[in-house]
């Protein structure tokens, strides 16, 4: 099966989430922000935004990738490469009586990127229940994984 080597997975995550160039193939870091989105259903490979949000005040939350906003760990034969926020990533508080469960997170290069621009997506574990007066958040225990 074709795939990336563990070393390249680490370099790719460092480039994407921490703004560190892969010097052998890239010399620029691009945008300094990664915008995270929460979805109530699987966005799929197309990065569908159909199930993003779920309450009136919802907005994507940004993490600066050039100033240490992400911790990237190296993949080895015993572990996979991961990227996690260095601090909790808070989304706007739910002010209405809307309720639901966020089951997936998606990384985008901007606050208003369309579905086709999605960088990564994956399930949230544990899921995030939202209701009035709740502030949904991804924690330092949340991660993006390359395998």
Image (cartoon, grey):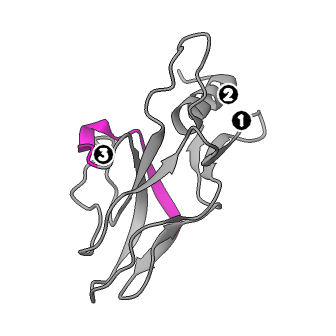
Q: Which residue is mark 3?
A: 47
The first of marks 3 and 2 along the sequence is: 2
Q: Residue 108: give x, y in percent of width and height.
A: 37, 44
Could you tell me how far apart the alpha carbons at marks 1 and 2 are, in whole angstroms? 5 Å
Is 17 drawn above or below residue 30 in the view shown?
below
For label 1, the residue is 75
The residue to which callout 2 is attached is 6
| Residue 12 image-quadrant placement | top right
Q: Secondary structure at mark 2?
A: helix
Q: Position of residue 134 (x, y in %)?
A: 43, 83
Circles 1 and 2: CB atoms closer than 8 Å: yes
Q: Earlier in the sequence, mark 1 or mark 3?
A: 3
Residue 119 part of the magenta-drawn span: yes
How many numbered circles does the render carry? 3
Name the side, left or right, on which 44 lies relative to 147. Answer: left
Relative to residue 77, is residue 84 drawn left or right?
Answer: left
Q: Quadrant of the C terminus?
A: top right
* Magenta extent: 112-126
Crowd band around label 2 with a 10 angstrom C-alpha radius: few (<14), some (14–19), many (20+): some
């Amino acid at each position: 099966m074709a795939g990336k080597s563990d070393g390249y997975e680490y370099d790719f995550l460092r480039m994407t989430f921490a703004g560190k160039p892969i010097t052998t193939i890239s010399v620029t870091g691009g945008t300094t922000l990664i915008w995270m989105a929460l979805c109530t259903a699987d966005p799929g490979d197309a990065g569908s935004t159909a199930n993003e949000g779920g309450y009136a005040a919802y907005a994507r939350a940004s993490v600066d990738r050039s100033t240490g906003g992400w911790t990237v760990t190296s993949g080895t034969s015993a572990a996979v490469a991961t990227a996690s926020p260095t601090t909790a990533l808070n989304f706007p508080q739910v002010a209405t009586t809307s309720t639901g469960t966020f089951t997936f997170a998606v990384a985008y290069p901007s606050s208003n990127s369309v579905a086709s621009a999605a960088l990564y997506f994956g399930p949230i574990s544990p899921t995030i229940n939202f209701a009035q007066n709740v502030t949904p958040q991804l924690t330092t225990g949340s991660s993006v994984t390359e395998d």
